[in-house]
Image (cartoon, helix red, strand yellow):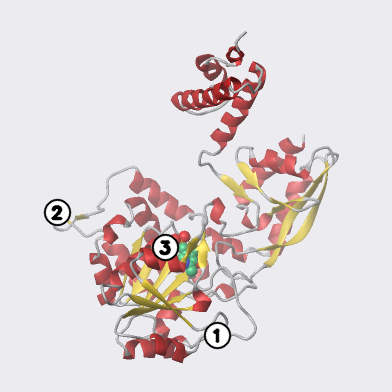
Amino acid sequence: MSPLAALPSVEKLAAALTPEVPLPRPLINLFIRRQIQHYRQLLLAKEEHSREEIEDSIREKLREFANSRLQPVINATGVLIHTNLGRSPLGPRAAQALQKIATGYSNLEFDLPSGTRGKRAGYLENALACLLETESATAVNNCAAALVLTLRTLVQEGKNEVIVSRSELVEIGGGFRIPEILETSGAKLVEVGATNKTHLHDYQKAITPQSALILKVHRSNFYIDGFIGEPEIPELAQLAHDNGLPLVEDLGSGAMMNTDELAPIEHEPTPQECLRRGIDLVIFSGDKLLGGPQSGIIGGRADLIAQIKQEPFFRAVRCDKLILTTLQESIDQYLETKTDPTQADVPVLKFLRSPIGDLQERAQKIIAQLPRDQAEITIEQTLARPGGGTMPRSEFPSIAVKLIPHKQSISKLAKRLRLGTPALVGYTTDDALFLDLRTIFPETDSLVTQALQSALS
Ligand SMILES: *Cc1c(COP(=O)(O)O)cnc(C)c1O
């Protein structure tokens, strides 16, 4: 018999797997066809596989593929702004606004008083400038895009040198590095100073007629300590301005309130502070500590923002109505709670503030409902982290449910929880699985309990 006789039929296998895997049928068909093609090659190359083996493997791979579909996850990692888990969740108010704008028509580019074409994001830009206490502001798709756009706008033929301290040539994540971002933007990097120390005169010596701007990059995902030093922002701003150069800062996260007042963590610089000290343009993310949608905000001097908005690349990275809606909602909330920004309805800020006693109580409630014969289950003091490339030194007290399963491995238990609905993601050490309460929405505690009950059965 031909070895190819082991290959299942696409139609039959698809019909068998369709009830198990909730994906559109054409996608299941395509996936199976590709897998069978793959096994055809193996069989022709004399690698033996039985039909059963092939079917089981395709079923398993199809399930894994189905799991890659974007879906809700319960974050039990204790990392508040988890880049892999979608960074900041939106608050209910932003979600409601999103629902309304997404499912209907809106005045996105329509001026209602005159009944003619209107300005996109006009309201948002005003609200942003007001919140940042600066002349002007705008927003694009993300912080990296905001940086590229700003650099592209401010460098030109023969005047394209961007001066950056060697202590700030960072990798912002996912392999993206400041020197490469500069190159993409048509800028020529001029490095100054040393890894640990950069002096004002280092910047001064680097200024030439070809200089376009001085760039500061916030060390958001690492820190340096020891014999270090850099000029204060006001003196660097003075130097830049004396030479007719803008001083731009990529701030990364950019908190809207004093983070050190919310939890025992570092003070994350706010965009307002930077601008007050003399930065001409500040750039930061909308979905880190701000707690809005993925976006990149640029605020500062009106003449520079106007130039940025005229750069053709702006059109390529402009926000769509869904982002504009949720960002508008986030910014309005901060404006409304300006006297006490800790009151803004932003989930990550609530998580930062949650008292340890509340977390303890919730953990107790969860474990009281779990079977005790399947695992050793305890409540542990742990450390949560802001994450998302913010405040790399800040760990602060939290509470986790700790599980040491008796009859299955820790990795097996963790995997079962990850593959549940909703998916539950904790973290493991050599000897236990931890589910940190700080990043779990209290209203999903019952889902956590159910997930554990089922995974421990
Ligand atoms: C996070 C970060 C970025 C990138 O922000 P995105 O919104 O992901 O594009 C850029 N610069 C710094 C310093 C950051 O911390």
The residue type indicated by label 3 comes to Ala
Q: Which mark is residue 115?
A: 2
Secondary structure at badge 2 equals: loop
Secondary structure at badge 3 equals: helix
| Quadrant placement of the C terminus | top right
Disc 3: which residue: 144
Q: Nearer the viewer, mark 3 or mark 2?
A: 3
Tell me if residue 411 comes above or below residue 378 in the rendering: above
The residue type indicated by label 1 comes to Lys
Q: Indicate which disc, 3 or 2, sits on the residue closer to the N terminus.
A: 2
The residue type indicated by label 2 comes to Gly
Tell me if residue 157 comes above or below residue 145 in the rendering: below
Which quadrant would residue 241 be assigned to in this image?
Answer: bottom left
Q: Indicate which disc, 1 or 2, sits on the residue closer to the N terminus.
A: 2
Tell me if residue 243 comes above or below residue 167 in the rendering: below
| Quadrant placement of the N terminus | top right
Q: Indicate which disc, 3 or 1, sits on the residue closer to the N terminus.
A: 3
**Residue 301, position in %: x, y?**
30, 78
Whether residue 278 is visible: yes
Secondary structure at badge 1 equals: loop
State the count of labels.
3
Q: Are marks 3 and 2 in contact (CB under 8 Å)?
A: no
**Residue 211, position in %: x, y?**
33, 81
Q: Which mark is residue 197?
A: 1
Foreground: 161 or 250? Answer: 161
Mark 2 crowd level (few <14, some 14–19, many ≥20, 10 Å Cα): few
- How far apart are the two marked residues, 1 and 2, measured between alpha carbons? 57 Å
* Residue plotted at (38% across, 61% down): 145
Foreground: 174 or 399? Answer: 174
Q: Is residue 75 left or right of residue 366?
A: left
